[in-house]
Amino acid sequence: MQAITVMVAHPEKTSRDACLRILGPEEGIQVIAEARSSLDALADAVRFNPRILLLDLTLSKLNGIALLPTLREKSPQTRVILLARRPSQARIMEALSHGAVGYLRGKDIKIFLSKAVRRVDAGEAWVPRKMVARIIEHLCPLSVPVRRAANGLPLP
Amino acid sequence: MLLIASAIPSVRKHWSQGFRGMFKGYEAADGVALKEKLSKLKPSVLFLDLDLPQLGGIDGAAEIQPLSPSTRIILFTNKPEEKEATCVLMAGTKGYCRKDISPSLLKKAVEVVQKGEIWVGRNVIPHLLEELTSFTERSQKDSLLEDNVSLDCLTTRERQVASLVAHGSSNKEIALMLNITERTVKAHLTSVFFKLKISDRLRLALLVTEYDRART
């Protein structure tokens, strides 16, 4: 069976190495490329067609999210999982709106990275349940909105 | 307070199993009774069998929400389908699952929808994301065509520089190609960024490509 090919795009070497360390021993998963900037990431993704692209949300000065539409077009079978330390909901929603299918936050990366890669390769998304209601609200702004308190949590 | 709507007594029994003593359960066996009880009781959660007689399937289910806007509706079916799930969720349903869901999972489903979250199989989420992405792509194409922020506001020279950036040329290469100084190239670029309200070459490249494509 073919290995799941993964590419890591993150400006910091320590973070890229961490992903390599976590995924290295995993059977059936192979990291085939690394990138440090958006332009590298895009060029390499198009060239290598990784199955999974692990993309840092804040990739270099260039907006990581900006490459998603082109990636979707030029490498449609690549599925993007975002990596972010403490991402804002707005940024995540923006990335999901442009084709990302999952995200992992700082502390979850170590625990869930391999699982997320396998699930996303199998066609699933990797987003917390709480995100689903927000996705729907985003899609249907005219529908009855969930009433939210000041901190963003839904009111009963 | 819970309202259970199904024509099949064994199904109603199965659903109410986990809730005896916890919820005051009310029942309806057809669409007429459902509408009456829904308007009158305004339950916090409604379990609705999609096969309910006189309901009208998913279209009917979408239409009953206005009878009690605060009620969280969970739809049940024997044959869950991802596309159908996506449609009902976009219509405002809070949950979609199999009729033979286990009582303990059903309790969890109620907890989840009461918190304002959605109860649906994991396999549905990629479909929702696909909807979201297509929706975004369509909106952006529309706004690119309608917006006054179009490439028409650029001067000829600025337009030339923008196109060359979109093709991946560096400032040095552009300078050579247009027979101007690098400093001038940068000045043009600054003006382009300002007029288009963007701040980086990658975005510029994407904008130019999209703009050209939308016009062919």
Image (cartoon, coloured by chain):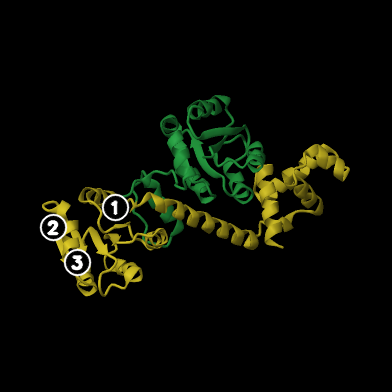
Q: Which numbered dot is residue B8?
A: 3
Callouts 1 and 3 in the same chain: yes
Q: Chain B is drawn in which colour?
A: yellow
Residue B87 to residue B125: above or below: below
Residue B103 visible in image: yes
Which amino acid, mark 3? Answer: Ile
Circle 1 residue: B113
Q: State left or right for residue A44 relative to residue A102.
A: right
Residue B145 to residue B20: above or below: below
Which quadrant of the figure contains the N terminus of chain B? Answer: bottom left
Q: Residues within 10 Å of mark 1 (few under 14, many from 20)?
A: many
Residue B115 appears at what percent x and percent y?
29, 49
Q: State left or right for residue B107 relative to residue A149.
A: left
Front-most of residues A7 and B202: A7
Q: Which numbered dot is residue A139?
A: none
Colour green, chain? A
Report how far apart the C-alphas of labels 1 and 3 lie in the structure. Answer: 24 Å
Residue A66 appears at what percent x and percent y?
60, 45
Mark 3 falls on what kind of element?
A: loop
Report how far apart the C-alphas of labels 2 and 3 lie in the structure. Answer: 19 Å
Q: Earlier in the sequence, mark 1 or mark 2?
A: 2
Residue A131 appears at what percent x and percent y?
40, 47
Circle 2 residue: B24
